[in-house]
Image (cartoon, rainbow, N blue to C red):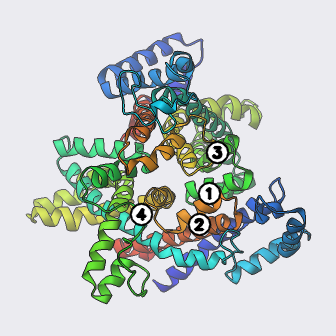
Amino acid sequence: MTNQAIASTHSPTELRGLAATLQHIRHVLGENWVTAGAFALFVLIVLCALIGPFLVPYSPLASDTAAALKPPSAAHWFGTDQLGRDIFSRVVVATRLDLIIAVTSVAGVFVIGGLAGTAAGFFGGWTDRIISRIADTIMAFPLFVLAMGIVAALGNTVTNIVLATMIVNFPLYARVARTEANVLGKTGFVQAARLTGNSSWRILLTQIVPNLMPIMVVQMSLTMGYAILNAAGLSFIGLGVRPPTPEWGIMVAEGASFIVSGEWWIALFPGLSLMLAVFCFNLLGDGLRDIVDPRLRT
Amino acid sequence: MFRGLIRRLVTIIPSLIGVVVVSFVLTRVLPGDTAAYFAGPAATPQAIEQVRKQLGLDRSLPVQFVDYVTSLSQGDLGNSLTTGQKVSKEIIARLPASAELTLSGLIVAMLIAIPLGVAAAVRQGSLIDHACRVLTTAGVSLPVFFTGLVLVYVFYFRLGWSPAPLGRLDVFFSAPPTITGFYLIDSLIDGDWETFRATLSQLLLPAATLALFSLAPIARMTRASMLAVLSSDFIRTARASGLRGHTVLVTYGLRNALVPVITTLGMVFSFLLGANVLVEKVFAWPGIGSFAVEALIASDYAPVQGFVLTMAVLYISLNLVIDLLYGVIDPRVRVDG
């Protein structure tokens, strides 16, 4: 199935196409139980983020020094940390913050990187040269290191973690969009749109951008896991999120000093959640790619 | 070959300029008082003014940029507030520790990932292929600091096989005389087997952590490119001509399949240099990553900036080496220069 065919299904007038896509998605999910499982996990993570804070048995910040450093038990499923806080509650509550950081940064770079790349590929010339040069310069740094430098320079806040994640992901989006827009710009239907007197901007917004959507959405789900890892890594080294706030990266960092004395549960559960979330997004990304563009399958 | 090298060296100049401009922008042009950054959080207004004068921040931006580039070209990265040492000196002293760790991680990863990818491609759909797929998907999903902690728990606390995760060498050993700065090599040159063994046991876990993290993309690319090569005509011809299976696979198959794998190495290095920071923190490794992290916590900006710049230059040079490797593996690339 080509990109255009899928893109056209987004138009409400072609309900038949939409039905076909849904059927295709159901087919892929049915055939591929791994993707289906990842999808179920994804729903669970989103539920945790939405209603988790209302369901947890303890306050994520309430300390109880009498019950400090207790291994998992019926009362505390994931045990308690050095201040007697319930780790299960903290892990569940942390989902929201981790997901917000990942989603806002990825959504932001999706729009900015996607538009910049599209403009570069479609207009070419100086637009292309400037945007490609920016992307190349960012890529000249090891990405996590650049993110560290950005957060250090801009100030140690969660907003800046989001911003840094957006900047280091920019080339990944801009490059994909650029290549695709360049190819699309030479296709027959774009030539036809131009011949009928549409302006460049109109062609860009009505012909190019909608057809870029599928591949960009795949790119988004493939980099979502990396965005989560990047943010968690930054908070692990003490950037962004401040200590009492429940967040997976910082919770692993807090538990790290207890690993050598055998209190494994403090670091294990936030670490496992982080791993599962990233695993889930990577599997979903692969599955989504198979749905949208089976040719890219490796 | 020589002209190709020169031509390739010229192409890294724009990247270097970009990196220097970005690191300048990161400190000077961003909102906030740069002098206050460099003076540290506890500085008095007078101290901040003094730093402003010292760094030439009271002059115009273009002049500042020229100053910045001039001091960079003299290898001056400023002074660390917490240690008072020159940043460049500290980074050079700590670089071998990081390099030893990163390179060991990469070598271990390649030793596992390339055979694994080849095996998965040769026996497509077999158990080993599935194992390869699980490993590659899990490998990119694992937070590297978390894997490190799990390894520490299992191999240090539970099994007691490895030493405490505290640096490059146990306190009972003294570092071998510095020749390359790599303890493994230095202790071998010194003929000191005890130190070599101690270094190796200290290095094993952090290197394995990095390897687990970086073997996924390598194995995945090896498998994909090996599959593509094995289905091509010249492999069929080689088989039909009665060459031994091993010759077909290694000499004809692997050598051709390696070019895209080398390309992925560039990306792997980007991840590896970042992951290095996290692993150094977990294992209290005295490299440049933990140096930067300590400085970050203390809001000591000069070391962080020096670290980012060093990493970027290292990364650019590694990419250069990778490009030169193409020529070694695939002579056709050499002709194109």
Q: Which residue is mark 3?
A: A240
User: Label 1 lies in what chain?
Assistant: A
Disc number lying in front (3 or 1)? 3
Please, what secondary structure does the residue beneath circle 4 have?
Answer: loop
User: Label 3 lies in what chain?
Assistant: A
Q: Which residue shows up at 24% across the image and 52% down it?
A: B159
Q: Earlier in the sequence, mark 3 or mark 1?
A: 1
1 and 2 marks in contact (CB < 8 Å):
yes
Identify which amino acid the numbered label 2 is placed on.
Ala
4 and 3 marks in contact (CB < 8 Å):
no
Please, what secondary structure does the residue beneath circle 1 have?
Answer: helix
Whole-percent x and y of residue B208?
33, 58
Q: Is residue B316 visible?
A: yes
How far apart marks 1 and 2 lie (CA) works out to: 8 Å
Q: Which residue is mark 2?
A: B312
Identify which amino acid the numbered label 1 is placed on.
Leu
Same chain check for tags 3 and 1: yes
How far apart marks 2 and 3 lie (CA) works out to: 23 Å
User: Label 4 lies in what chain?
Assistant: B
Same chain check for tags 4 and 2: yes
In the picture provided, is A65 more to the left or to the right than B41?
left
Please, what secondary structure does the residue beneath circle 2 have?
Answer: helix
Is residue B291 positioned above or below B192 on the image? above
Whole-percent x and y of residue A141?
59, 61
